Amino acid sequence: MEIKRDYYLDKLIKHRHNGFIKIVSGVRRCGKSYLLFELFKQYLSDSGVPDDHIITIALDDRKYKDHRNPDTCYNYVESRIKDDKMYYLLLDEVQMMDDFESVLNGFLHIKNLDVYVTGSNSKFLSTDVVTEFRGRGDEIRIYPLNFAEYYEALNCDWNKAWDSYCTYGGMPALFKFDSDIDKKEYLKRLFKETYIRDVVERNKIQNETEFEELLDVIASNIGCLTNPKKLADTFNSVQKSSISEPTIKQYLSYLAEAFLVNKVLRYDIKGKKYLNTPFKYYFIDPGLRNSRLNFRQIEPTHLMENIIYNELIIRGYQVDVGNIELREKKGNNQYIKKQAEVDFVLNQGSKRYYIQAAYEMPDALKKQQEEKSLINIPDSFKKIIIVSGDIIPKHDENGITIIGLKDFLLNPHCLEL
């Protein structure tokens, strides 16, 4: 089955010949190699690029083991260039090469070489690329299939697709399996044998058991406010084990560096400043999250929130959790201050949106509860409630836009309407 990834393919096409190293990053097994070696390579061929002008090296393939040596790799690429026409280098899992920064910098000096690489470790992006390339590295982040891609590939009823996506998520290899048991076992093996092993080996974690216990706590509490101290207290009281706050902080950074989770900061809307703690974590894929809990804790409300968050970051928004202070009348003309939450504060250039995610909004009371924090935001940026199901977008008497989840997930421009 060919899974279209047009959103990312278009990004690669738009970044051709821009003088930068194009770095396709993301969690392992999310489709980076498929995007580069199948879809983009096919696009180049269809555009008239001769096969001998497309150089492919997969460093995680034993066939190219010797190319993990930087000199061997550089000399091989240089030997393939025979004329002045444009050549394309597709280099997979570049972090497996020693001293890859200097090799990629060397490729930048070859004028008729357009370079595309993949990598699965964010450390080499955030540190090495910024430092070594001095602005000449161009990151294109790829994620597991979002719901629209999954829905198109599955080609079935909306409700069935939604239930399946909430359970198994969007790892592309899932389409190889027919039974639920096989899908579950694949995701559990993937997490244990690939992600956990990678993180433990890369960061030399001594106590793998406590690291996995923390991972399970995070999986159980997606979308909940937390911080290292709160997590340490949880281990002391519930898990009956002790992990220090600095260790928890380090473990959380390892998970983020492996692209498994995203940390979301809190933003004081009225004060226009970020708050230090607490914050939230969302998993990069709902199926990976569920696999950590053996598919026993599939809450539609929290999963819907996680899926909405992932969709927003895929669309290029900077996403924070909003915090706003409310004054509520207590009686006798007295008021009390309360802290309220806005699920998502979105920024993209000059655009800003405030979003609440509501799994159900069956009556006026629930609608009032969902709107309360939005109504008290003292600016004129668009305020939106996303409700599960398939409803026609509408504006209510408070100027708040109500969008159905189906429309949000399948229409990337719905927030602008």
Image (tube, helix red, strand yellow):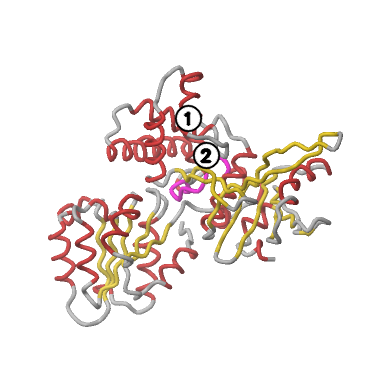
Label disc, if present, on residue 229 of the rendered structure:
1
How many C-alpha atoms fall within 10 Å of the one at disc 2: few (<14), some, or many (≥20)? few
Confirm whether residue 227 shows in the render. Answer: yes
Q: Is residue 185 above or below residue 383?
A: above
Question: Which amino acid, mark 1?
Answer: Lys
Whole-percent x and y of residue 80?
17, 71
Q: Is residue 195 above or below residue 14?
A: above
Between marks 2 and 1, how big is the CA–CA gap?
Answer: 10 Å
Tell me which residue sits at (67%, 57%) in the image. 407
Whole-percent x and y of residue 100?
22, 57
Confirm whether residue 181 shows in the render. Answer: no
Find disc 2 in the rendering and name its residue: 277
Q: Residue furthest front?
A: 333
How many C-alpha atoms fall within 10 Å of the one at disc 1: few (<14), some, or many (≥20)? some
For the record, the magenta segment spans 166-175
Asked if residue 248 lies left or right of residue 370, the reply is left
For mark 2, give the secondary structure.
strand
Asked if residue 345 lies left or right of residue 49, the reply is right
Observer-nearest of 72 and 324: 324
Observer-nearest of 163 and 244: 244
Whole-percent x and y of residue 123?
32, 49
